[in-house]
Amino acid sequence: MSIIKPRANRVRTVRHIARLQEPNRDVLVQYARFIGDTADYVLNQLIDTTLAKDRDFIAWRVEQPAVPSSSQPRRETSGTAADRI
């Protein structure tokens, strides 16, 4: 029995580009195939279920002013310009 259930409803999605370690990407793709849904859906469910259990994060988030995520500055944490092509 899978931990993540296939989606029941549709929610507006936005594009977000991220880099995954290859073994994690492989597991993500396999799990999506296992439940018959997309890797995007699996990632969203993992975020929903994992971060929803982080009490420190939830408390911190309540204290933050309401700022749309699109106004947050972008920061590159690793990689070279050639990696971004």
Image (cartoon, rainbow, N blue to C red):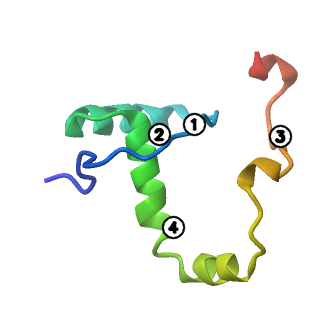
The spot of residue 45 in percent (x, y) is 40, 53
Establish if 54 lies above or below 38. below
Distance from disc 2 to disc 3, alpha carbons, whole Å, reads: 20 Å
Q: CA distance from mark 2 to mark 4?
A: 18 Å
Report if the CB atoms under discs 1 and 3 are less than 8 Å apart.
no
What residue appears at the point 37 percent right and 31 percent down from the top-left corner?
A: 29
Please provide percent x and percent y for residue 2. 20, 52
- Mark 2 lies on residue: 24
Total marks shown come to: 4
Q: Which residue is mark 1?
A: 20
Give me the C-alpha separation between circle 4 and circle 1: 18 Å
Mark 2, other Cα within 10 Å: few <14 / some 14–19 / many ≥20: few
Task: Check disc 1 and give the amino acid type.
Answer: Leu
Q: Is 15 left or right of 2, judged from the image as shown?
A: right
Is disc 1 placed on a helix, strand or loop? loop
The image quadrant of residue 69 is bottom right
Q: Residues within 10 Å of mark 4 (few under 14, many from 20)?
A: few
Q: Amino acid at mark 2?
A: Asn
At label 3, which amino acid type do we have? Glu
Name above or below for residue 56 compared with residue 67: below
Which residue is under mark 3?
A: 76
